[in-house]
Image: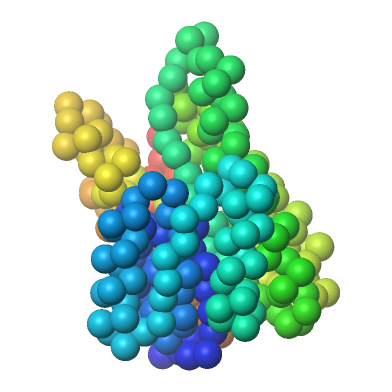
Amino acid sequence: MIDLTGKSALVTGGARGIGRACCLMLARAGASVAVNYRVESPSAALLVEEIEGLGGEAFALAADVARREDAEMMVDEAVSRFGGLDILVNNAGIWKESAIDEMSDGEWGEMLAVNLTGTFHCIRAAVPAMKEARGGRIVNVSSTAGQRGEAFHAHYAATKGAVISMTKSLAVELAPHGILVNCVAPGWTVTDLTREELLGPARDTILKAIPLGRAATPEEIAGAVVFLASELSTFITGEVLNVNGGAVLVG
């Protein structure tokens, strides 16, 4: 039912986890996909091969979203190759633990640079092309932590809360240009970043806090992203779509 044929997409942090699932699902729906990565070159190359094997169009693009010049280069390359940019998925992010009284300036700065400033860099770079096309979709990946906080991850929660606020602000600002800006807020999801926690001693505690009793798959998060990028969501903007098995409702 979702048909993105003729559309072009850029997914940051697209080589693994949620980003990888988004790239594949967008491609299966017909979109051409630019797969951004920072260091996972082999994974990105394999993903491009997989998409091409499905009959889709994709290319991999190395860039550090925390660097303005990298973000601008990445968007320019996607626009040049595809003739425009219809969909931007801001998925690149990091998640690290630190007690507030032990957190260094470097840890705080790194989290903001990637999770928040990186999202800002990519949106600022992409908006001119979307304005010229008189439309576009921006889907930001936040977290339940951005809505209710997360102990020992104050810097992470702060960035994800800010992404939600930025989403709502830009939804109003960009609506006159036909650009819809929304946010997907995952809870615990099985990825390389979280696998150790989900398989470790905290597993039972984590799962008890999720009404559905399990963590999400990357594909379950990607489904929400692709929905917001599709023609099924033409009257939705400024929304935070929770995909967390009900976890944000308890505890």
Residue beneath the point at 51% across and 52% down: 63
Residue 210, located in which quarter of the rendered image?
top left
- Number of marks in the image? 0
The image shows residue 246 at horizontal and vertical percentages of 38, 51
Is the residue 164 above or below the residue 129 in the image?
A: above
Is the residue 88 above or below the residue 56 in the image?
A: above
Is residue 164 visible to us here?
Answer: no
Residue 178, located in which quarter of the rendered image?
bottom right
- Horizontally, residue 160 falls left or right of residue 153, namely right
Viewer-closest of 80 and 243: 80
Residue beneath the point at 42% across and 86% down: 30
Is residue 169 visible to us here?
Answer: yes
Residue 26, located in which quarter of the rendered image?
bottom left
Viewer-closest of 78 and 172: 78
Residue beneath the point at 26% across and 66% down: 46
Point out the residue furthest to the top here.
Answer: 101
The image shows residue 129 at horizontal and vertical percentages of 72, 73
Type of colouring: rainbow
- Horizontally, residue 91 falls left or right of residue 222, namely right
The image shows residue 40 at horizontal and vertical percentages of 34, 51
Residue beneath the point at 66% across and 50% down: 69
Quarter of the picture containing the N terminus is: bottom left
The image shows residue 127 at horizontal and vertical percentages of 73, 66
Quarter of the picture containing the C terminus is: top left
